[in-house]
Image (cartoon, rainbow, N blue to C red):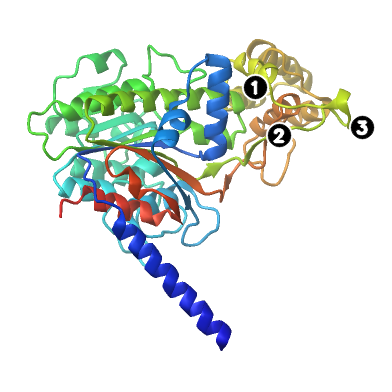
Amino acid sequence: MKFRIVTCLFCILALLNASIGFAQIPKQQPENIIILFADGTTSSQYEFGRYSSRILRQQPFAITDFVMAKGHFQLMKTESANYFVTDSAAAASAMSTGQKVNNGSISVTPDGKTPITLMKFAKDSGKRIGLISTAPIYDASPAAFSVHAKSRRDSESIVNQYLLLEPEVLMGGGVDFFLPNTVNGGKRSDGKNIIQAFQERGYQYIDTPDALNNLSKPKILGLFANEDIDYEIERNPKEAPSLSQMLDAGLRTLKQQTNLKNGFVLFVENENTDSAGHNNDVASLMRDLWAFDDAVKIALDFQNRNPNTLIIVTGDHETGGFSPTYGRKNLAPAGNTNYLNVDIQQLKLIEQFKMSLNEFSTQFKNKIKQGATKPELNTFLNSLLEENFPGLNLDDDLREKIINQGQLYPNSNYLPSNILGLAIARQTGFYWGSSGHTPAPITIAAIGPGSNIFRGYDDNTSFALKLQRLISRK
């Protein structure tokens, strides 16, 4: 009984302290809010971005060196309504609505309710809104921040709801579910051309990077790939814009109207950081972290000119169990002559890589589908490595698994990408614990008016509640 009383008193005091602490935070009212969202990342990825940017680019990493160092910082736990390890849909839904949902759901609770999303709340509060992503724009994270669907696979429904919501900025990949399946590349089963429907509502439609320089309307729809925009390591700048280019265009669009007293909320996602984690692709992760940080610098420049802007840098969960570490070069006894640690030589090795592991996997699987023999597959594998992964050694055990389409570990579901990722790890020290998500707490770094509300350790549902508080003018 005494223990129960003490426990209850402790809980009551903790709740009172939390309430008092929250109430004592001054309510600074940002006019504009930019949410920079690196899917699949947390502190380990950001630290890798900082180290590699300093060593290889001789450039500061704005996320760590400025936003985290000069602003405010918070950790948030991520479990979904039904699992300890969340997926993107459930994590983004919690951050958008303030309520837990099951994995795979888009802002729909387990009992079927549809709590208001962050972007709808912002729109109802009189703010202009925007969604930008390197993924298909109807993908889990941007969808969960704006609309509702029982399944993250309900792409057609999600696009239909975008048309009803009418965000002033909508840019990314995913032209396929904006076009009917009677058109080349289209996947819509209802026969509708949603691009045309947006244009009829006053949107300027663009599909090339150059068109971003010629914006003339207050609303923009930009679709630059059939599905995902390519990883930065292989993106063709003539075909698809960088995240920085899309962000710059989005900011110009949101600021161009004369009546801006209510400001805007803009969600900007790099999905490729998550995909790189799934594939255990350290080279692609590095370049997309740099690209994401370049976008953060664009946002900071905007904030410098518009100081009433709050910048938030975050993600939804960690992907891959990213674990750079030291160890042995090979299975010989440990010692000074058999010691491997990450340094500039390992960074320079991965900097030379020219292809994502996803593209490597696609090309190798296509070769298998063509009926290539094992000797032919081995020759093809050698050519892929020589041309795109110079300096990488492929041990015989991993070569055998790739050629024979073997398994790696039970938690390695992206093959043969994860196999080649292990080969890279053995030579560089950039190891991975999984090809899936992990429950590592996400980081929230914020700078600008209202940023002091982000501190301590909390649940990801509090992200939505804090943003609603900052958006609301009551």
Disc assigned to residue 20: none
Of label 1 and label 2, which has the lower sequence position? Answer: 2
Q: Which residue is mark 2?
A: 325
Task: Say whether residue 353 is left or right of residue 445.
Answer: right
Task: Give the answer, above or below, for where 196 lies relative to 102.
Answer: above
Disc assigned to residue 333: 3
Q: Secondary structure at mark 1?
A: helix
Tell me whether the residue at label 1 lies in contact with that at label 3, contact meaning CB atoms closer than 8 angstroms.
no
In the image, 454 versus 41, the foreground residue is 454
What amino acid is at disc 1? Answer: Lys
Q: Which residue is mark 1?
A: 367
In the image, 40 versus 203, the foreground residue is 40
Q: Nearer the viewer, mark 1 or mark 2?
A: 2
User: Which of the image's four quarters has the N terminus?
Assistant: bottom right
Q: Secondary structure at mark 2?
A: loop
Q: Nearer the viewer, mark 1 or mark 3?
A: 3
| Whether residue 147 can be seen here | no
What amino acid is at disc 3? Answer: Pro
- Give the x, y percent position of residue 440: 56, 48
